[in-house]
Amino acid sequence: MNKKTILTPTADKKIDEIKKADILVGIPSYNNENTIGHVIKAVRLGLTKYFPKFKSIIVNSDCGSTDKTRKIVKNNLGDYKALETILIAHEMHPYMRSLHTPISEMVTTFRGTPGKGKAFRRIFEIAHKLGVKAVVVVDSDLRSITPEWIQLLAAPIVFKGFDYVTPLYARHKYDGTITNSLIYPLTRALYGKKIRQPIGGEFGFSAKVLNEYMKKDIWDTDVAYYGIDIWMTSVALANGFKVCQSFLGAKIHNPKKIATLTPMFKQVIGTILSLIEENHEKWKGIKGSEDLPTFGFQSRVIPEEVHQDFNDLFKRFQKGVEKRKIFWKEILKTENYKALEKIALKTKKSYSFPNELWVKIIYDYIIFYHRFKNIFMEMSLPSMLESMIPLYFGFTSSFVLKTKNMSNPEAEEEIENLCLEFEKLKPYLVENRDKRD
């Protein structure tokens, strides 16, 4: 077990005072002053309404907010007296970290660079020390969260014996493009579970899953940042935990800009590649995929519209062709590289990025990573991951063009077709990976 702790003696003392808890809800935050008050209220009401007989804890793990986030959290928590509350503030200043309760404030020391995964690490450690039965984590930029979300994420664990709960949302066809084009279809093909939102941001998990997380020493990797969500989901799937989904309705949150998605893409994909290597024996023999048990009433919800600019995405793809083709020639099979060259020459009107080519390209990257993960010759891992980004723009622009006149359900059918292509071509991954050993 990873015994290294980042909690201060002051924090440990507060945990000792609380002693034991049943349910913990963790909320990582960073400059979310416009939304976190609503999130806190929804969480508290959800715990009070649906779990009145359980001892519940709310943990706010802040990643160095410079706005009024922590002040708003403290003020909102002060409105409710029924539950214990822990706030953990990870300040950008390297010598300050604060542990707050509704009654008092304590200051302790923390050193290190903030990251979403590091915020989760503190949540995990507190939950583990309190011996909770269930942990729920929710993002702090949510505008659509309701008290029912807490029930839907915790109740399958507390009352139904599940170990891991992932969210199921009504989302616009252009929301979550990394998930739609890569994370969902690849995760589904690898582990054989139709887990629609592997990196949704809202999860519930049992003490058994928490104990598995606590065994891992991965906090010097991309898991400490945006890689945390896919790592959590992959660990649950690879270790055979009982997984389900809960329908939460529409997810309305602060949309991420392309500039933000670039580091997120690299960190998530870098994490996936390492997990694929680690879990090879567990996924290589899985064929097809199966539905997951799903909780919640799947009402007809119209999600908030998300705009994707085809011209911008296509331009980013074209710019990447000249800059990254030397990498692609090294990584991709010859026939796949030649096919990519052909579509890169197409005009906007005739442009199309076939599903089959996209899947083979992704599998080529996985195979290349397997072959050169320890040496990479003169190519570093960051450069390899960087070379995937224009391809992501290229495939996403094709999806936007193809689905521009489609409804959200019709676009979802296109994503389903992509998933089936990932499953169909999985032997390409397995066989070529073994050939290159």
Image: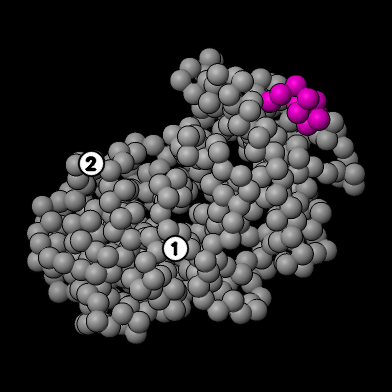
Q: Is residue 135 left or right of residue 145?
A: left
Relative vertical location of residue 365 with respect to residue 107 in this rendering, above or below: above
Q: Position of residue 20 (x, y in %)?
A: 16, 67
Instruction: Determine the residue positioned at 24% across, 81% down.
Output: 53
Identify the image quadrant of residue 422.
top right
Q: Position of residue 295 (x, y in %)?
A: 50, 73
Q: Is residue 90 left or right of residue 10?
A: right
Q: Secondary structure at mark 2?
A: loop
Few, some or many residues within 10 Å of mark 2 (<14, 14–19, 20+) = few
**Which part of the image, by quadrant, shows the N terminus?**
top left
Q: Is residue 100 left or right of residue 237?
A: left
Residue 334 sits inside the magenta stretch = yes
Residue located beneath label 2 in the image: 1
Identify the image quadrant of residue 76.
bottom left
* First to last magenta residue range: 332-341
Q: How many marks?
A: 2
Few, some or many residues within 10 Å of mark 1 (<14, 14–19, 20+) = many
Instruction: Determine the residue positioned at 19% across, 51% down.
Output: 7
Q: Position of residue 175 (x, y in %)?
A: 63, 60
Q: Which mark is residue 165?
A: 1
Name of the residue lying farthest toward the top: 377
Nearer to us in this view, 178 or 277: 277
Q: Main secondary structure of the magenta part?
A: helix
Q: Is residue 256 visible?
A: no
